Amino acid sequence: MPQSTTLLQGTLDLLILKALTSSELHGLGVSRRVHQITNGTFDVQPGSLFPALHRLEEAGWLTSSWGPSETNRRAKYYRLTKAGQKQLVDETTQWNRIALAIAQALKA
Amino acid sequence: MPVISRLAALWKNLTHHGQTERDLDDEIRGTLDLLVAEKIQAGLTCDEARRIAVIELGGVEQVKEQVRYAKTGALLDSVFQDLRYAARSLRKNPGFAAVAILTLALAIGANTAMFSVVNTVLLRPLPYRSAEQLAMLWTGIPGQTLQGRPAYVTVEAWRRHSKSFADIAVLDPVSVTLTDTDGAEKISVARFSPNLLALLGIQPVQGRSFSDREAEERRRLALISHRFWQTRFGGSDDAIGTSIELDGLPSQIVGILPADFHIPSLDADVWEPYTLFPDWEARRGVRGPGSWFVVGRLQPKVTVDHAQTEMNAVARLLDEELPAAERNRGVTVVPLSLYVVGPKARLALWMLTGAVLCVLLIAAANIASLSLARCVGRTREMAIRAALGAGPGRIVRQLLVESVTLVAISGLVGTLLAVAGIRLIRAFGPLDLARLNEASLDLRVLAWAVAISLLTGILIGLAPASTMLRNTLRLSGQEGGRTVSGGLAIRRIRRTLVVAQFALAIILLAGAGLLVRSWLSVQSVDPGFRSERVLSMQLSTTAFAAPAQRANFYDRVLEQIESLPGVESAGLIGDLFISGGSEQIVTTDGSSGTTSGRLSLRRDEASGRLFTTLGTPLLGGRFFSIDDRPDAPRVAIVNEAMARELWPGSDPVGRRFKLGPGDSAGPWFTVVGVVGNMRRQGLETEPMPQMFEPLAQNPSGLETILVRTSSDDPLTMVATIRAAIGRVEKRAPLYGVTTLADRLGADLAQRRLQTSLLIGFAVVALLMAAIGIYGLIHYAVATRTKEIGIRMAVGAKAGDIFRMIVREGLQLSVMGLMFGLVGALLVGRAGSSLLFGVTATDPLTFTTVSLLLCAVAIAACYFPARRAMKVDPMVALRCE
């Protein structure tokens, strides 16, 4: 099972954005969701996840708010912004294009 | 837009640092809590859950650090952190900080001041339009030091034939007597062609210049310099239109030149048309040598080399049309900047800049060595940093920031010192170095100060940084860092630094030594006359126009002066100290008919007792006497150099010569005496051929009177002499009173300054190198007490230990000496044109400074070695 440390930074960003399409999640929640939507293929380490979350927030694609967590402790919840939604669409298109190209190259 | 968003985030990260940190802490700890809760729910115990959760998370601080790296402005933030830490570390070590800042500030200040001089004198473009296109033209073979000046016809021919030059202008500075209601005074007047101002790109600041037609008509118009306008007319508006009396004739002022206009070494108070020479009609047609300074503006994109090649061809072409005796010896094109500051002065300036840079390097080496010594106590700190996640790059960066901060503070203080230094230079610097009084702290100089500070900071920081890199992974953190490998690397670097310091120091010492010997040589040069107790002053006579009246006046003055008690003798000459001669065609009368040739010579009138007053030896024939009257045959006294040129190997007394080609109308001179050579162009210049005529046969309106007094302070006689002259003629203007000894001293001013500066730098360098080696050996002894104890325990005597320590220090200094000597030889050769009377590889100088260096090194090792000697083996072996 490939560890998430082998993920390129771009694909991690894509997965995080996708994970947040339907709901607002805190950091651990994002990690669980990514695990879920990739059927267990990718397990994102906190050491890579949190820096990515902060980076995406600073770029303006995520926004955060504070709320209570499951343990009633103060937790930071992230959600997509409009720009983030658009970014997700752009990156998805690009990813599909790359995947297609590589698949064709490998077939040849 | 990500960019805007990131900028906002940057701002928030920098300004709300504390809040950001708290949020991050909450977030990560919160996540940890969630993980623990999950594990507990899955059935693990509290401790077990916590342990596994921490492993899964990867460590709270580690994750937080990762996040910090990813945030915008992380780099800036960590640099600020480094800066705060650097400031704190300096505050905690005030002794080190004070020593380092003081030393570096002085070194940086000296460097900045020196560079500001170089900047003003050498690097700033001259104050003319596109000054790099301007060049001087001389007659003479390119490369020779003696360059001649052309006659007007030659310049006209150059103008006609050359295509490399867009325009060529001439000027000739002369001494003229200005008479006004206060009396008469000598001023310098430049006679120039009308195109000169346009060629240089200068406009009069008031009024106008004269036109070609006005020059042709020889109209007596004049422009005045800004300084002249301020001092004579108080800067008033009605200066234009007033008339001034020059050499007895009125000239009308039509223009005022700008304040910053000056041609270095060709400056003048009044500027008038070139046609106003009294003998203009004759002068304009004369071929052969002349007296014009020629300035040309090159066509755009034409280089000096290209122009030189073209002018060589032009000169050859022109020479075809001339008889042999009148041919010029070619043309030399010299960029104007090279004329303004000659090669020697440039070399001296660059050498001094290099020397003061060496001093900075030596100082930096000392500070680096000190930093390295401090390093030893910081290995533990660095190991902890590494354990917390600092990569090697981060640690290096922190050390560099520390050293750059230190040097930045020094640089600031140093720049302030430089401002003071520049003010000192402007007040006391050599007056003949062009534009020195414009030295200031402009942008380029500031940039230099910043650059050398930065470089020094990095150099100082590299030493500890490179050793730290080796040590960061060693988490053992042995106390005091006495681990062999860490300590060894540091010792090796410190020893290299000491070797480098000594190498640089010996280069400076050798240079200073050579300059000192040159100075002594110059001082011991025989000027050809005896300068002690002689007064020199200048006397002008516009009152008398006729030669006979002038001669009579001067004779009476000399008579009056000689009759005073306390005066041994008095004599008269046109000018004792000269800047050059003029090239003439000289025809001599030989047994085989007349022969003509070119000679650069100096012509002066002299009174009968001049040579006696000066103490110049008579080598043959006689001095002038009263028989040499205006109506008697023309006679001359020549100096040895001229005699050797014209009549090598035979006695010149009784021979005849004439100035000009054989068929010219000038008189034949008969040589009646030969005198010894006088060095009138400065002590370092070989005396040129000189001829003297009797005062009666060629008096001029301005003469120099020399009085040999019997008192040791000739200046006390000035009042009585002035009174004596007043008895002959009440309003005779007397000025420029000085002693010959002072005048000779002034000549040496530049050399004296260079030598003193270099000696100063060399001494400072040697002192700092001595401090460096003292520090190293002292530290070595302190850390090797155990080893010394062991040695003593197995039989070494105190003397052996002493010698061992001193030998170590000597080894380092000798190694430095070897490297440095090579450098010194190279530098000596590069600067050999500054030397006088010594070769660049003078063995005496090199041996002396080498011995001096070794002696200083031994002295510096003396005290640590003595301390080593006193080590008690029992105590040493017990101490850990």
Image (spheres, rainbow, N blue to C red):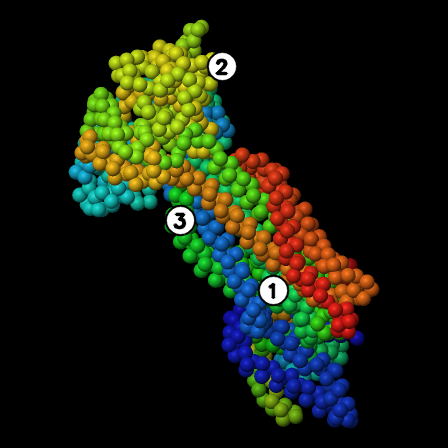
Q: What residue type is labelled 1?
A: Leu
| Lower sequence index among marks 2 and 1 | 1
Q: Given this view, does label 2 or label 1 mark the residue nearer the observer?
A: 2
Query: Mark 1 Cα within 10 Å, few/some/many (few <14, many 20+)?
Result: many
Instruction: From this view, report whether residue B764 is shown above or below residue B823.
Output: below
Q: Which amino acid does label 3 sit on?
A: Phe
Query: Mark 3 Cα within 10 Å, few/some/many (few <14, many 20+)?
Result: few
Q: What residue type is labelled 2?
A: Gly
Give how far apart the Cα atoms at labels 3 and 2 are: 49 Å
Quadrant where the C terminus of chain B sits is bottom right
Instruction: From this view, report whether residue B741 is shown above or below residue A79.
Output: above
Q: Name the residue under label 3.
A: B428
Are the residues under badges 2 and 1 in a single subunit? yes
| Lower sequence index among marks 3 and 1 | 1
Q: Name the residue under label 1.
A: B400
Residue drawn at 28 percent across, 13 percent down: B632
Give how far apart the Cα atoms at labels 3 and 1 are: 39 Å
Q: Given this view, does label 3 or label 1 mark the residue nearer the observer?
A: 3
Of all chains, the one bearing label 3 is B
Of all chains, the one bearing label 2 is B
- Considering the numbered disc 2 on the image, is that residue within a helix, a strand or a loop? loop
Residue B649 badge: 2
Residue A63 located left or right of residue B345: right
Residue drawn at 78 percent across, 64 percent down: B792
The picture places residue B390, in percent across and down from the top left corner, at 67, 71
